Image (spheres, rainbow, N blue to C red):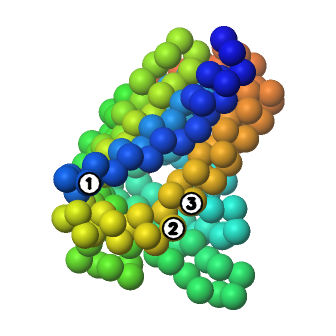
Amino acid sequence: MSTTKANRRHETQIVADPALPTILIIREFDAPPDRVFRAYTDPELVIQWLGPRRLTMRIDEYDTRSGGSYRYVHREDDGTEYGFRGVFHEVRLDERIVQTFAFDGFPDGVSLETTVFEDLGGRTRVTTTSLMDSVEARDSMIKSGMQRGVREGHERLDELLVAARAAAPTDVPREKASDHDKRNR
């Protein structure tokens, strides 16, 4: 595989169809789906990678069960805070997460996000589709700087997965769906 092709798969693709109120985000990671899924659902890991580097993060709630909810806050050095919240509507171990997403600053602007974890044989393609209320709401989200935050977050997730791979044996036993549910109650 050429270096160019390898680097391209590590680029976060963000696509906004002008005619649809959606944002499509695609990124590949050099880790199997179980590890990437865990990084998306374990609050101790989420806090280490989600969002831009310049912000600190506090998680108030992160219950990754179907029907569970979440709320977290990103904070600037000057004390400005940005809160986000939602509900997990479907959590399918290592495969899929469906959740709502809302920014506290725009409480009426709720999006529905579906994240799919595709097994690429030791690697994972993560595809998130966000459905907004309108094209205008989608454009407002993009203008807010979300692209930078998503890209930096994915870079941080890459770093976290590389560090975890270096620190952990390759044959870590997989948890069963019932263990995942127990851990997240």
How many marks overall?
A: 3
Q: Residues within 10 Å of mark 2 (few under 14, many from 20)?
A: few
Please give left or right for residue 24 compared with residue 89 in the image.
Answer: right
> Mark 2 to mark 3: distance in Å?
7 Å
Q: Are marks 2 and 3 in contact (CB under 8 Å)?
A: yes
Amino acid type at image mark 2: Gly
- Which residue is tagged 2? 145
Please give left or right for residue 63 compared with residue 59 in the image.
Answer: left
**Residue located at (63% from left, 54% from top):** 152
Could you say whether the residue bearing mark 1 is in a helix, strand or loop?
Answer: loop
Camera-side residue: 169 or 114? 114
The answer to whether residue 154 is visible is yes
The quarter of the image holding the N terminus is top right
- Residue 82 vs 45, above or below: the answer is below
Q: Residues within 10 Å of mark 1 (few under 14, many from 20)?
A: few
Amino acid type at image mark 1: Pro
Tag nearer the camera, 2 or 1: 1
> Mark 2 to mark 1: distance in Å?
18 Å
- Residue 171 vs 83, above or below: the answer is above
Could you say whether the residue bearing mark 2 is in a helix, strand or loop?
Answer: helix
- Which residue is tagged 3? 149
**Residue located at (22% from left, 57% from top):** 21
- Residue 124 vs 15, above or below: the answer is above
- Which residue is tagged 1? 18
> Mark 1 to mark 3: distance in Å?
21 Å
